[in-house]
Amino acid sequence: MVINGNLFVLPTLIPKPTLEAVEEYFTILADGVVTLWERLREDLPEWAGEYRFPGEATIIETKVKLSNELLALDARLRLLERLKRVLVLQGEPLVEAVIEVFDKTLPLKPRREEDFREDLTLVDSTGNIVALVEVKGVSKGVSREHVNQADSHRERNGMPPEFPSLLIINTNMKNSISLADKDQTVAPEQIQHACRNNVLILRTLDLLNLASLHMSGKLTPDEVVELLTTSRGWLKVGGTVEVLTS
């Protein structure tokens, strides 16, 4: 029997298979368990809880405060876990995850383009469009085609060739079983191709590392904006930031 989350295991003899014997059996059993529970339970009636020992009120206040802090920490941890989804997703879910990283951690904010599901624009604090973004999830590494798609994104929007265009790409999805597997370099020829086409490549791992540097205060909002709007090639971000052009 389970009472208020407590399990009672009672060895008994099976009663005779008659209605009267079964009824008597369960009546005696229930009475016995209720009596035992009344002796064992430690819950106080509400009125008894009104009595306070010295310092008890302070303990209760501290407990409530700590509980609220734990709830806030849990919420923060859940958010940080969600942001890591950019390392494992592709397609529409990846686009949504990239949007959340920008929304929650970076000074430039994303806007969704309705016509092309993998296309985003980035706007500054005044609402001006400062960069275009192409989001991709791929099984291997960055290819020439991915860079070309970021370039085409700019053409579709009628922007000049010098307008900032970002390729945010979740690479090596097929064979990654560890974080080290995700940290694969971009091939020099693709970096050079990106430079020629005025495109900036960021792996989703680079995006998270950029967010981490900004959140820790190691990069100011202005520095983040400058990196994303003036760099070309590969923005390689770890403990430090490198802009690779070959």
Image: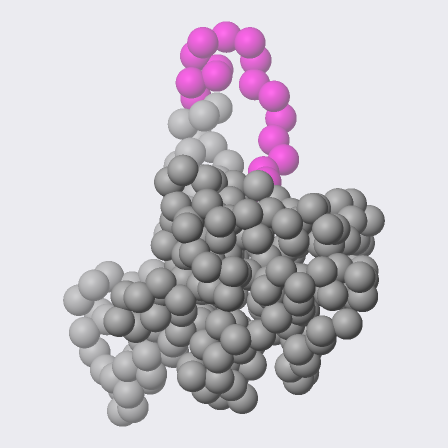
Numbered range of the magenta stretch: 6-24
With respect to residue 62, does 201 lie above or below? above
Residue 66 placement, left or right of 88: left
Mark yes or no: residue 97 visible: no
Q: Residue at x 37, y 54 (%)?
A: 111
With respect to residue 57, does 159 lie above or below? above
With respect to residue 20, does 50 lie above or below? below
With respect to residue 221, does 194 lie above or below? above
Viewer-side residue, 20 vs 207: 207
Q: How many marks?
A: 0
Mark yes or no: residue 240 visible: yes
Q: Residue at x 28, y 66 (%)?
A: 127
- Residue 65, image quadrant: bottom left
Instruction: Indicate the quadrant containing the C terminus: top left, top right, bottom left or bottom right.
Output: bottom right
Q: Residue at x 49, y 72 (%)?
A: 229
Type of colouring: one colour
Queried whether the magenta region covers residue 17, the answer comes back as yes
Queried whether the magenta region covers residue 245, the answer comes back as no
Residue 21 placement, left or right of 196: left
Q: Residue at x 42, y 34 (%)?
A: 30
Q: Position of residue 25 (x, y in %)?
A: 48, 24
